[in-house]
Amino acid sequence: MRRWAALAVAVLIASVPVTASPAAAQAGTSDPARAIKRQFRNEHGVRISETSRYFFDGKSTVSGNWFRIKGSLQFAPSGPVAADFTWWALSRPKPGEPPSEKPVPYRVIRVGEDVYDAAEHYPGPVPDGKKWIRFPNKHRGLMNRDMARDVSLQPIDVYDPSVMRAVLKRSTSDPVSGGFLYRGAVSYKELSRISKGAFVNPISGRPIGGKSKGRVSWRLWTGRDGLPKRLVTADTTGEGRNPLVKRTDTHYTDWGFRLAVTAPPADEVIDEADLLEYVREQNSPIPEDEKNT
């Protein structure tokens, strides 16, 4: 299920008392949950730039694989409804050396439930004139579904007002230049105890249970208007000397700018099922050579 950390935090506030600091009280006049909800207007959006890195030690400065996302998210009164973004992936570089390969950009467009991947980097043959591939959500994988939904791999869904209220109530708050900084955390064990559904760890892919070890912590910077400027989370799986940690750093700019994401032209799109059939036709069996054994 999508966004296990976000949903769990929303339930957690009912049972965990939190004393607001003076800074948190000041922030009540510019509540981020309300500020974000006010952005839910037709053909308005926000620009997003994000980096997710995987570390094999909580204190490590050398990352494993990492992902970068940059694009725009469109809103409607119901929340996020469309996205246009590019993502890149890089493998772990050698210590003291830059990455050995130039990152390959992957362009994605989402309009409603339809998600289109640019065909230019598809590993197999694609019919002439087809520049986009439309994949069913079930074939996109957890990471790709998350990115397409809100141009992010954050475990906390900032676009859910109830989740944001829960995060704020579980955070300490301090005034900073131009706004406020909120800090907080929740453990996997707490997530399991308070969650009503089954949740999957986005790092390991395993269900979270009562014995799961790990936690999600966050730092959220907002402006005086309450709108998020930056969200940094650390999603730690397991314990011991080398726990796996996913650190995600997201920047939000241009809240409320005019945005209308449109689907690619229909004649440039091919559905995944049709593409697979085309690939099979292009790779039809070669007739046997009688001279070969």
Image: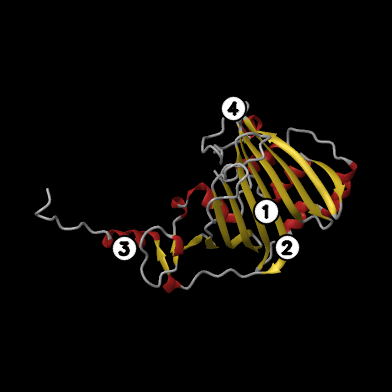
Q: Mark 3 = which residue?
A: 278
How busy is the neighbourhood of tag 2: few (under 14 within 10 Å), some, or many (20 plus)?
A: some
Q: Amino acid at mark 3?
A: Tyr
Please report whichever mark, 4 or 3, sits nearer to the chain's N-terminal start: 4
Query: Who's the residue at 61% across and 70% down the image?
Result: 260
User: Distance between the Cα atoms at labels 2 and 3?
Assistant: 42 Å
| SS of the residue under disc 4 | loop
User: Distance between the Cα atoms at labels 2 and 4?
Assistant: 39 Å
How busy is the neighbourhood of tag 4: few (under 14 within 10 Å), some, or many (20 plus)?
A: few
Quadrant for the N terminus in the image: top right
| SS of the residue under disc 2 | strand
Nearer the camera: disc 2 or disc 4: 2
Query: Who's the residue at 62% across and 59% down the image?
Result: 70
**Residue 67, image x, y percentages:** 58, 50
Tell me if label 1 and label 2 are in contact, CB under 8 Å.
no
Q: Mark 4 = which residue?
A: 210
Kindly indicate the quadrant of the structure image that contains residue 194: top right
Please report whichever mark, 4 or 1, sits nearer to the chain's N-terminal start: 1
Q: Amino acid at mark 1?
A: Tyr
Q: Mark 2 = which residue?
A: 255
**Residue 219, image x, y percentages:** 75, 44
Q: Please name the colour scheme applied to the rendered image.
A: secondary structure
User: Distance between the Cα atoms at labels 4 and 3?
Assistant: 47 Å
**Residue 191, image x, y percentages:** 64, 34
Q: Amino acid at mark 2?
A: Trp
Please report whichever mark, 2 or 3, sits nearer to the chain's N-terminal start: 2
Q: Mark 1 = which residue?
A: 159
Camera sees residue 176:
yes
Q: Amino acid at mark 4?
A: Gly
Tell me if label 2 and label 4 are in contact, CB under 8 Å.
no
